[in-house]
Amino acid sequence: MTSPHAVFSLFPSILHDSSTIWSIDSIPLRPPCHPRKSVSSQTRKNPKTPLTRTLHTSLISLYKSSRTFLFSLSVFELRSLPSIYPSFVKMATKRSVGTLKEAELKGKRVFVRVDLNVPLDDNLNITDDTRIRAAVPTIKYLTGYGAKVILSSHLGRPKGVTPKYSLKPLVPRLSELLGTQVKIADDSIGEEVEKLVAQIPEGGVLLLENVRFHKEEEKNDPEFAKKLASLADLYVNDAFGTAHRAHASTEGVAKYLKPSVAGFLMQKELDYLVGAVSNPKKPFAAIVGGSKVSSKIGVIESLLEKVDILLLGGGMIFTFYKAQGYAVGSSLVEEDKLDLATTLIEKAKAKGVSLLLPTDVVIADKFAADANDKIVPASSIPDGWMGLDIGPDSIKTFNEALDKSQTIIWNGPMGVFEFDKFAAGTEAIAKKLAEVSGKGVTTIIGGGDSVAAVEKVGLADKMSHISTGGGASLELLEGKPLPGVLALDDA
């Protein structure tokens, strides 16, 4: 068998060469691969020698020995590998909780990492229970088969034990949604926790206290991970929102519990964000907003490799405008990113991507809800005024582009939608996506403020998929590996 390391040596010269053509039966290699004894001299001399069975077998070996490498390739960095791309996506798929049945679950202690990081008001009342509701299907599946469920989550960013970040206020709502009384522990490890775990009945649920009350959690401390793992027999990660963090409860625990599988929410996130974007129905459009280019550089660069249409909005557009010599008034501009903006525009042209910037903007004389506002061409914002939303002509142009698309992913608002005067652009995009969703277009809301915007206009249920992960969604869109996913068992 060809050494996985020999196959690995083929990739650096190939992956970022868009002229390379791959096929299942004959894979042309250029330039000759790194000499290894396990790669025949004939292969090195003739770069067009078929490597069908050998390469396929070696890729599987490489995948098993280096999941991080292949997962990072499989998501968004294989534009030059179209014909074997589905195989990479399939190999990156993780085992789902749905493969576990009664024989494996009845009476077993299941450690479930969920994401219950929900917003609370000053009186510790839940203001948005989306993430709690998203965790319910996996929990109900497990309890339905008689598992003893141990839930672990974080809330906020506490520095040690902090009462306002306790998970206790979540128990009533969680119990209501599950239809069973959830008990909560005062800690996430220790003798008292172990006693409570021993008392969980079949089909019962115990919620551990905020796992980030222990600093060892975010340090991914092995001993802390072992203590968490000692509470259970197997592991389920359903916290996509923290999958980009290599923490003890998201990555470390999986080393000590088998099987370690993806929950239904995690699986759905991967199916959409990996599947729909890696093999989308064309034309494929992406809408990227937000205040700064710097926070979306990776996403934009990655999407330029995949999309047919890229629509930009939010505060970042003014950096692009200034780079083109436009007058931007007092609008937000990242001076150190002007060259980058120019480079991204040129890259879009070179790749044949239709990059749409707003042609008109809504400007304000101050950053406030009661500011004076008016609509002006994007090229001529007067001094003392700042752009806070895209204008009506831009909305029309964007909508026309979206009407032509079959797959759409949206990350980031078009303006300061928290202020009603400057919410029209964001709300218009949300309404258009809801409209085309009803016509069979795949619409994916990629986490963060986009989700809040869609929920604000009451259209969340109209979208194909709304991601629960802000940072995780961004990192996945950038093609970065997610530690919480890589740690799980392969399908």
Image: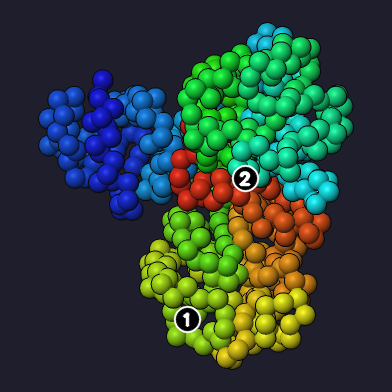
Q: Nearer the viewer, residue 240 or 49?
A: 240
Instruction: Tell me: residue 433, above or below residue 76.
Output: below
Instruction: Tell me: residue 107, above or below residue 460.
Output: above
Relative horizontal placement of residue 247, taking residue 424 as reference (left or right): left
Q: Which residue is mark 1?
A: 322
Q: Which residue: 60% across, 89% down? A: 384
Is residue 10 at least partly visible in the picture? yes
Residue 249 x/y as whole percent: 57, 29
Amino acid of disc 1: Lys
Q: Secondary structure at mark 2?
A: loop
Q: Which residue: 55% across, 35% down? A: 215
Instruction: Tell me: residue 341, above or below residue 382.
Output: above
Q: Which residue is mark 2?
A: 157
Q: Give me the disc on residue 36.
A: none
Q: Which residue: 12% across, 37% down? A: 45
Q: Secondary structure at mark 1?
A: helix
- Give residue 69's quadrant in the image: top left
Residue 71 x/y as whole percent: 44, 37
Q: Which residue: 71% across, 68% down? A: 417
